[in-house]
Amino acid sequence: MTTDVFLEALPIFLLIFCRVTAFFVVAPIFNHSNVPAMFKIGLGFFISLLIFSMHGTNQALIMDAQYMLLIIREVLIGIMFGFVVYLFFATMQTAGGLIDMQIGFAMANIVDPVSGVSIPLLGNFKYLLMLVVFLMMNGHHFLLIGLMDSYLYMPIENEWFSRMADGSLAQFITNAVISSLVIGIQVALPMVVAMFITDVGLGFLAKTAPQFNVFVIGFPVKIMLGLFLLVLLMPGMAIIFEKIFSVMFNTLEQMLGVVQGPPA
């Protein structure tokens, strides 16, 4: 009897486990290389058990050829869920890249241990600052709660493939990427405008006083002014992060609605 119950529950549990672990692979905080793989697997296992106890006990599936499509669907849902979260964290790297190009820090890019690629210096600083604020407000708890509640909006039997076929998901991804890029540009805009005005001032200086070597004094002036403005803007970063987190969670809610809609 126990074996029969286990065999009936295993297919549902594996599908839930696929969605949870796929989310951990992509989502910030959980996808860091500093987080041990065993911890990710163990956390995913226990969260999958909780989700199964709430949403999977009254369902049954058979492991047949169609079951592979269900696994692919759950993995895609988990990746999409984590990708949307990562998009809005990457806004800080986008903003930092624009600021670095204006200040002159673009020549000092560093290697990100998570992705293994070069990232902007100030972009990495703002990204890590955003992670700290997100952890302080227990944002990772909200992400896990959202992942668990996703089974209310997108149960095991959801309309993922049909939404892919009619283009709804493609439109959603496009809008999410555009939103993240716009936010990144808006965050960097004050510094970019300030550096542009500085360049204009240095240009006037080169015309009125040709004896000054603008290329020599321009770099330290822009670096000192950029760091000074960055310090002035730091108190307002908390408000910016709050707005980004609000847009991020609203976008996640829109994704749930695009795929399946609210529960009946």
Image: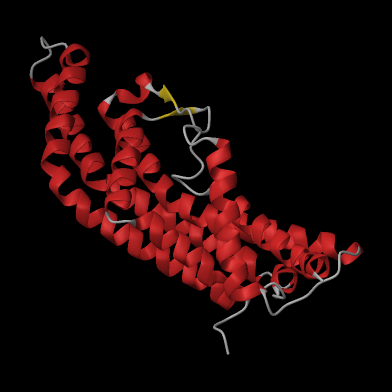
Residue that protrudes farthest toward the right in the picture: 65
Camera-nearest residue between 175 and 79: 79
Answer with the quarter of the image where residue 16 lies: bottom right
Answer with the quarter of the image where residue 250 lies: bottom left
Above or below — where is 256 with respect to 115? below
- Quadrant location, the N terminus: bottom right
- 170 sits to left or right of 113: right
**Residue 112 position within the rendered picture, expressed as x and y whole percent measured from the top left:** 45, 28
> Which residue corresponds to the image point at 18% horizontal and 19% vertical from the top-left?
218
Residue that protrudes farthest toward the front in the picture: 1
> Which residue corresponds to the image point at 16% horizontal and 51% vertical from the top-left?
236
Answer with the quarter of the image where residue 2 lies: bottom right
Residue 154 in view here = no
Camera-nearest residue between 89 and 103: 89
> Which residue corresponds to the image point at 12% horizontal and 13% vertical from the top-left?
210
Above or below — where is 91 with respect to 14? above
Total tally of numbered discs in the picture:
0
- Quadrant location, the C terminus: bottom right
Residue 31 in view here = yes
> Which residue corresponds to the image point at 50% horizontal and 49% vertical from the top-left?
27
**Residue 147 position within the rendered picture, expressed as x and y whole percent measured from the top left:** 52, 64
- 40 sits to left or right of 75: left
**Residue 242 position within the rendered picture, expressed as x and y whole percent measured from the top left:** 27, 59
- 123 sits to left or right of 3: left
Residue that protrudes farthest toward the bottom in the picture: 264
Q: How has the structure been colored for display? A: secondary structure
- 259 sits to left or right of 191: right
